[in-house]
Image (cartoon, rainbow, N blue to C red):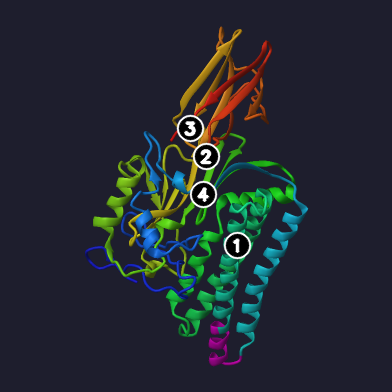
């Protein structure tokens, strides 16, 4: 698909299936180089009119001197809690099974396409594989929604929900490799399946994957525990965690807000220069409204520009030295961001301090927003030196400060922080941030 001389681009079109039609995408570089984008089916099944109405309250929350963030509206949150993910033999087995099943699809496609004796036979392989992938992706979509519904209803614990998310993520990633191979073969035999249909297959995998889920797939096998903050709604979820590195500590977050995505895909062409870029500057002024960013394309073929959903990947000074510090996906019909990934270096993120002091020691809690970074340290009030302390969050042990700031994820509700000092315990209570 091509942009015209005015930078206009076709808007959303009908999905491959009406039932699972939310998977459309487009990604482009800010310099008007169209790359690729990724669409996200809404995780719930709200009526389109309801979804559009709910986006009157834009789900991107503004921030001062840092990147805004995509959030589930507080009135729609159904669960919010911290989950510790560690060694999980059942989870590790599920990941292995999912990976092998996904790899099998790619192997089967290659073998059947190579063995086909005629072009007609090869075209039939393409058509049959497309149908199989459509069904396989639909199965993953249904599994994810069923798991979300069960978790929100209290029918399964958070650990079981996360286990299912991780297994779905793994298989979706492997099916993405099959879709890429399908596109290559399809192009070689005259595209018996239109490129837009293959692009839609690939786009439907996007809401089934995420960088936090990728991390958890490793932890269920290696046993290293990881604390993850999990927030859910009927059609959305947020996962966030802290990653300790050798030279820096990073914050990683993925968010999906289904109500910001219109599953009817009404055609609505937009101008990149007059509509899309100004919208990003409006929603993320600290990132897009200045020259502090650099933009990166998120693309490989097939290109998803037919979808009418536009995406951008950006690096910025508070990021993690990664080209994808902020990744956003925008629906032209709802005029809203519905999918977002954030990566930040916690040392660069602005915070507000909550302090309490007693008997020569000071507890400092560096706060941000709910499910954002949270820093905790203890200082000697006379020297200002950091003191080694054991940290508790709402009574749960987090670890030891090691004479530095201990970073974790901020709970949504009011919470208490307690630390041990040579003269006793220090406790402070932090209220919500709205």
- Comparing 197 with 247, the one in front is 197
Tell me the SS state at disc 1: helix
Quick check: marks 3 and 4 in contact, CB under 8 Å?
A: no
Mark 3 Cα shell of 10 Å, populated few (<14), some (14-19), many (≥20): few
- Comparing 220 with 5, the one in front is 220
- Label 1 – label 3 distance at C-alpha: 31 Å
Q: Quadrant of residue 100?
A: bottom right
Query: Does the magenta stretch mainly form a helix, a strand or a loop?
Result: helix
Tell me the SS state at disc 2: loop
Q: Quadrant of residue 37?
A: bottom left
Point 52% across, 60% down: residue: 207
Is residue 70 located in the magenta-colored stretch of the structure?
A: no
- Label 2 – label 1 distance at C-alpha: 24 Å
- Which badge, 2 or 3, comes first in the chain's sequence? 2
Tell me residue 399's x, y (percent).
68, 29
- For the question of whether residue 321 can be seen, the reply is no
Point 34% across, 72% down: residue: 1
Q: Which label belongs to residue 146?
A: 1
Tell me residue 255's x, y (percent).
49, 50
Tell me the SS state at disc 4: strand
Q: Is residue 224 left or right of residue 298?
A: right
Number of the front mark, 1 or 4 = 1
- Comparing 62 with 123, the one in front is 62
- Which badge, 2 or 4, comes first in the chain's sequence? 4
Report the residue marked by disc 3. 432
Report the residue marked by disc 4. 254
Number of the front mark, 2 or 1 = 1
Q: Which residues are magenta?
A: 117-127
- For the question of whether residue 139 can be seen, the reply is yes
Q: Which label belongs to residue 371?
A: 2
Number of the front mark, 3 or 4 = 3
């Amino acid at each position: 698909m091509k942009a015209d001389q005015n930078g206009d681009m076709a808007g959303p079109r009908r999905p491959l299936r009406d039932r699972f039609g939310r998977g459309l995408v487009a990604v482009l570089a800010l310099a008007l180089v169209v790359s690729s984008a990724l669409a996200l089916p809404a995780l719930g099944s709200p009526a389109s009119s309801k979804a559009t109405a709910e986006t009157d309250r834009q789900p991107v929350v503004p921030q001062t001197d840092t990147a805004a963030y995509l959030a589930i509206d507080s009135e729609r949150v159904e669960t919010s809690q911290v989950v510790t993910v560690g060694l999980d033999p059942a989870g590790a087995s599920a990941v292995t099974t999912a990976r092998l099943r996904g790899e099998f699809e790619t192997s089967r496609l290659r073998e059947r396409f190579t063995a086909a004796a005629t072009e007609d036979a090869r075209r039939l392989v393409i058509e049959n594989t497309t149908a199989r992938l459509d069904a396989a992706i639909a199965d993953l979509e249904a599994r994810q929604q069923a798991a979300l519904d069960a978790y929100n209803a209290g029918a399964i614990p958070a650990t079981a929900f996360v286990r299912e998310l991780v297994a779905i993520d793994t298989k979706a990633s492997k099916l993405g490799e099959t879709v890429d191979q399908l596109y290559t073969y399809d192009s070689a035999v005259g595209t018996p399946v239109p490129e837009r249909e293959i692009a839609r297959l690939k786009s439907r995998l996007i809401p089934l994957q995420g960088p936090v889920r990728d991390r958890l797939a490793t932890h269920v096998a290696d046993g290293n525990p990881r604390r993850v903050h999990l927030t859910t709604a009927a059609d959305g979820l947020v996962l966030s965690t802290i990653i300790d590195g050798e030279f820096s500590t990073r914050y990683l977050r993925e968010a999906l807000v289904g109500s910001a995505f219109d599953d009817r895909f009404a055609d609505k062409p937009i101008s990149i220069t007059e509509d899309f870029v100004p919208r990003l500057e409006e929603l993320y002024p600290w990132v897009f409204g200045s020259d502090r960013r650099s933009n990166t394309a998120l693309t490989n073929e097939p290109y998803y520009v037919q979808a009418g959903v536009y995406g951008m990947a950006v690096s910025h000074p508070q990021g993690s030295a990664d080209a994808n510090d902020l990744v956003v996906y925008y629906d032209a019909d709802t005029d809203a961001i519905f999918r977002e990934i954030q990566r930040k270096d916690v040392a660069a993120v602005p915070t507000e301090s909550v302090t309490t002091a007693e008997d020569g020691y000071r507890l400092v809690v560096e706060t941000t927003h709910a499910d954002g970074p949270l820093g905790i340290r203890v200082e000697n009030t006379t020297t200002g030196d950091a003191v080694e302390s054991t940290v508790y969050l709402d009574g749960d042990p987090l670890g030891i400060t090691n004479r530095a700031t201990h970073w974790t994820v901020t709970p949504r509700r009011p919470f208490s922080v307690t630390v041990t000092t040579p003269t006793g315990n220090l406790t402070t209570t932090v209220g919500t941030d709205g």
